Image: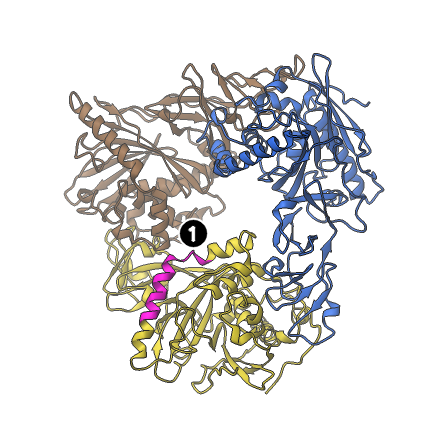
Chain colours: A blue, B yellow, C brown
Amino acid sequence: MTLVDSRHDVRGAAPARAPEIDIATTRPGTPGGTFMRQFWIALDNSANLPPGRARPIRIMSENFTLYRGHSGKAQVVAQRCPHRGAMMHLGWVEDDDIRCVYHGWKFDCSGQCIEQPAELEGFSRKVRLPVYPTREHLGLIFAYFGEGEPPPWPPYPESAGEGIVDPWPMYKVPCNYLQCFENSMDEVHVAFTHAPGGSHARLAKDLPVISAEEKDWGLLRFGTRASGKVRHTLHYAPNIVRVIVPPLAGMDGVGGWPEITFSFTPVDDENCLWVLTSKAFVTGKDKEIFLEKRAEIERKRLEAPPVMQVVEDIWSGKLSYADVRHLDLAVVQDIAVQAGQGRIEDRDDEYLGRSDAAIIMWRRILQRELGLIAAGKPHKRWTTPPADVVPIIGI
Amino acid sequence: MTLVDSRHDVRGAAPARAPEIDIATTRPGTPGGTFMRQFWIALDNSANLPPGRARPIRIMSENFTLYRGHSGKAQVVAQRCPHRGAMMHLGWVEDDDIRCVYHGWKFDCSGQCIEQPAELEGFSRKVRLPVYPTREHLGLIFAYFGEGEPPPWPPYPESAGEGIVDPWPMYKVPCNYLQCFENSMDEVHVAFTHAPGGSHARLAKDLPVISAEEKDWGLLRFGTRASGKVRHTLHYAPNIVRVIVPPLAGMDGVGGWPEITFSFTPVDDENCLWVLTSKAFVTGKDKEIFLEKRAEIERKRLEAPPVMQVVEDIWSGKLSYADVRHLDLAVVQDIAVQAGQGRIEDRDDEYLGRSDAAIIMWRRILQRELGLIAAGKPHKRWTTPPADVVPIIGI
Amino acid sequence: MTLVDSRHDVRGAAPARAPEIDIATTRPGTPGGTFMRQFWIALDNSANLPPGRARPIRIMSENFTLYRGHSGKAQVVAQRCPHRGAMMHLGWVEDDDIRCVYHGWKFDCSGQCIEQPAELEGFSRKVRLPVYPTREHLGLIFAYFGEGEPPPWPPYPESAGEGIVDPWPMYKVPCNYLQCFENSMDEVHVAFTHAPGGSHARLAKDLPVISAEEKDWGLLRFGTRASGKVRHTLHYAPNIVRVIVPPLAGMDGVGGWPEITFSFTPVDDENCLWVLTSKAFVTGKDKEIFLEKRAEIERKRLEAPPVMQVVEDIWSGKLSYADVRHLDLAVVQDIAVQAGQGRIEDRDDEYLGRSDAAIIMWRRILQRELGLIAAGKPHKRWTTPPADVVPIIGI
């Protein structure tokens, strides 16, 4: 196991090596954009997209259309019709095809234009709508935006054991995805950021010493407590954390500590989506109780003040961070702190310590990989995470 | 009659010839800005401006003040007082003069400063407020923003025949004026864009073949149906369409198919105004019925959700285009599709067909005229449209 | 007394001399920013900051945290924790220290890091949070953002005579501070800008002739009426006016004409704060009546439409300036006119007259001082205003 050295003062250490590489951007054509486009990217909850509906999406600074055919197939295609640029999601889903609202051009789900009502025969053969491989896993929709064939499917294994696959609501967060992914590597913040309201009290009792190890599939992170217990958290490249977390507030402990898989998906360089699914290890009659309590939480969520409104009020000083209470308090707290670092955190002006060991390691990996990509050199072949490396509560 | 050649694939044809000319901009000092400033520009409904009132307006990326003197005269003047830059519309209209709110400087409607309460005699003679020729026609206010004398008045003839001149409400649309003007040349879109709700059902029965002819005053466009009937639509340079359209929803057919004259007035390069007036061919007792139904529509309009709110909800995917119903459904649809092409449509990335014949022709005219203007060469002298070339329903 | 010459036409006179100096900016590193950072800057009302609270502030294009320790001490510190950039105002005030919300780093009010719960001993010694001298005077909080020692305290004397120190509500105004400061030198505007509603009727009876004199501490300005009476107003460098003004609307004359000291504090180049305190010369039983009426006004203020909403409606033409009535009518009027000059007024396009004598003088002083600063030459040593130069009503 390669432990990151503890160091008292590593300010600027990582950026100092290759300051010219922007590790936060995922715009197309940048090293970061190319790096991210090697992977399947989670972009929505399956339940948000009924058959026959189309929606606009924005992923890694590019706009697309996501629709679900009447057969149930989800498909990502270009944002605009190749004819005159109308938004494809305004059109009609017909079987598994999509028809443009402007002049009725129709495309099948391979992107081939198959109808142009006002044009002569033969023109349609020449017209294609860009399409992107699209699949679903554990209640989430994924797409592949890179060159060539996508990586093996699925992007990560389902948690073993009986239980309920339970996608959580998505959040749009007004900051770069990387500071959210870094926060997921930052076990110490729990004791402070989530102290108000106390939902994470058990995690905050004593502070872990952090270490990490690079794997073929990402980063395996350890949080060692004074008791000697070690918490294991999995960080799947390029933007996913798999971790065991305390029961949701409002569940009264039903479902125990669920395992969540949490994608930090770039919308653009200044916004990201949190796309989450979880496995609740409930069986038998507990399943019903679990689903009832879950539905109750969803009902209450509709009545709660919007998360971003509360966050804005905390940022402006109108609300006091320590005094805020909310159905999604941990979410409010995380967004207030992480997006509060700035739309894109200034990583040149930090003062990192030993508790930042995993963050430092991941930044070095990004520097290395993006540097190789920028130089046109061979870079790491990431593998699909194996089913037998699993998170461990360890507290 | 010069027909535009049908072509199967003319992607990028027009822009490819002179990519350096921006045909969409109307900013001052650009070829497009100079081109537009040769013409009278419609900027408001007369009824929106009572005597004694002043309002701010923004036309072709420049700000102005529009006021109506107590004699009834409308006048466009500069946005700001030449003294210290206060907004003129905050001041007082006195007779046909306007007085600044900041230090009471007063200007007559020729722009001459005629009072400066706190200054010495003689200074005012040296100070002028820029003014612009301003006149009214068929319920609309027009101004001339170019050099030298404006073109002949009025900018276009009134439709012949007894009836009611009936200005429609204005809309501010968040996109470049040219894509709206181009849409007015695009008869095929009606069958698709306006299919939901069915107000244009009769137009959508069979698709027309489009052709067009350049005239001294603009473009005469033809839509030929399978039946052999030909619809004639007039496009007056630089931004006006005159067309016969189906009866407004809610009119129950009273007034028949009105003739509308529709200006797409640039606010700036990313916004435009739709400034419309119409002639309803009603006579005798029908006039009263028409006006009653018209007033009823206006009352209902106040209760309808704002058009742009519905459009935004369609764009975000919150509302389904096909399912939306609204008092101004055709307006909602047109704005959703046209402004949905982007604030300024990317014309380098299109795939034009034979149905785009009129659009292709107008773009070539713009390329030609703006190219001549850019080169400082003599360019076309556009004439006032004659009264005897009129639109024809032709379906 | 050095009078500014009256001149009929001095358009562009001041800017013409040194157009390269931007007299409006206060960004750090600019001549204007360095000039402003020589002085104590008023930034908030003391009453807005209870013990134990922290708030974000933005002053001269830089972000900071303002907090009040439990001992009552107010302190300005950096916006962000030096560790990983979390916003300090989200954290906890402990005694007179502040603790970061992200990982619990704690800083004393000198900025020294004194706790890092998850780090090894010895690291904290190396970490400092930038702090800024912070003091309070006449109900306002001031800080010093410059190099070295701040100027003598207090920044200006308290008005002599028995009375009540009465801070007014703050306003955030969407324009550069300098056009507000210039407006405070512009006695003539009162007769026009504040004519609607009539609260300044007595000032508008006859127009003063303006002159001014540079002092060690700023500008002493005179407004001479036809009667021979002379109004004295004090402009303390760099952004404060001290003046006697008519009784507030709603006070029914109780407190007579108060003396106000009014700071125009840059938030950034396009926004400023109005930070005001006043002295009402009430004694004995009148104090109670004064405070009661003051409280009544504050209650009514909560019910009045927000000032900026009214201003926006005036700007858009939805409301008529002349017809607007509001509890804070003079504030609405001043913001509508001053911020209506543009976020940063275009001073190259003016037509100044004799009534602008004080503004011209202050611009020349700024040109001179900022020019010396830009050239790295010795510049004026401004002194604290003496207590014996006081404003005079003079009407």
Residue C175 in the image: x percent, y percent? 41, 43
- Whether residue B85 can be seen here: no
Q: C54 or A173: nearer the eye? A: A173
**Residue at the right extreme of this rendering:** A378
Q: Please state the extent of the stretch shown in magenta in the rendering.
A: B292-307
Question: Is A53 placed left or right of B307 in the picture?
Answer: right
Residue visible at 42% across and 68% down in the picture: B275
Q: Considering the image in quadrants, where does the N terminus of chain C appear? A: top left
Q: In this view, does B137 lie to the left or right of C226?
A: right
Indicate whether residue B302 is drawn in magenta.
Answer: yes
Identify which residue is drawn at 76% across, 37% down. Answer: A156
Find residue B172 and report its horizontal and vertical position in percent.
Answer: 45, 61
Residue B267 relative to residue C105: left or right: left
One can see residue B21 in this view: yes
**Is residue B245 placed above or below A299 in the rendered structure?**
below
**Residue B386: percent from the left, percent from the top?**
44, 85
Residue that carries the numbered disc 1 in the rendered image: C348
Which secondary structure lies at badge 1?
loop
Residue type at mark 1? Asp
Neighbour class for label 1 at 10 Å: few (<14), some, many (≥20)? few
For residue B211, which quarter of the picture? bottom right
From the viewer's side, name the closer residue of A119 and A369.
A119
Residue C344 sits above or below residue B64 on the image: above
Quarter of the rendering containing residue B247: bottom left
Name the residue at 58% across, 82% down.
Answer: B225
